[in-house]
Amino acid sequence: MPESVVHFVVRMPSALHEKLSSRAMEEKASLNAMIVAILRKIMERPKPNGQSSTPNDTPTAGVGGAAEQGQMAR
């Protein structure tokens, strides 16, 4: 059975959008496909205690969080 698709709007600085768009063009991928791949890769990283991250246990960025400050995990 196919996966369901969720539509989600992301606000980001225009400079970040330009960088992501350029990278997607270089990789001959859609911007959406590239962002989904990046998010999957981040979610599959082991946590410091050795467990994988899952969407249900990932903290959300609040006011003053990395997302608010325009920073990305590397």
Image (cartoon, rainbow, N blue to C red):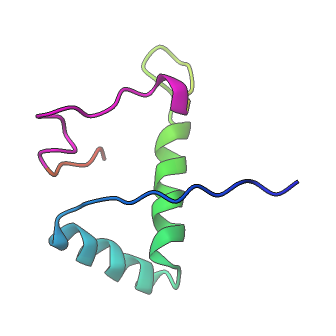
Q: Residue at x 11, y 34 (%)?
A: 64
Q: Residue at x 47, y 13 (%)?
A: 49
Q: Position of residue 34 (x, y in %)?
A: 49, 68
- Residue projecting furthest to the top: 49
Q: Position of residue 67 (x, y in %)?
A: 22, 45
Q: Is residue 61 magenta?
A: yes
Question: Would residue 53 be visible to someone looking at this image?
Answer: no
Q: Main secondary structure of the magenta part?
A: loop
Q: Residue at x 54, y 49 (%)?
A: 40
Closer to the camera, 27 or 65?
65
Q: Is residue 60 above or below residue 69?
A: above
Question: Would residue 14 be visible to someone looking at this image?
Answer: yes
Q: Is residue 53 left or right of residue 22?
A: right
Q: Is residue 39 magenta?
A: no
Q: Which residues are magenta?
A: 55-69
Q: Position of residue 5 (x, y in %)?
A: 64, 58
Q: Is residue 69 left or right of residue 20?
A: left
Q: Is residue 30 left or right of residue 65?
A: right
Q: Is residue 23 above or below residue 34?
A: below
Q: Is residue 1 left or right of residue 12?
A: right
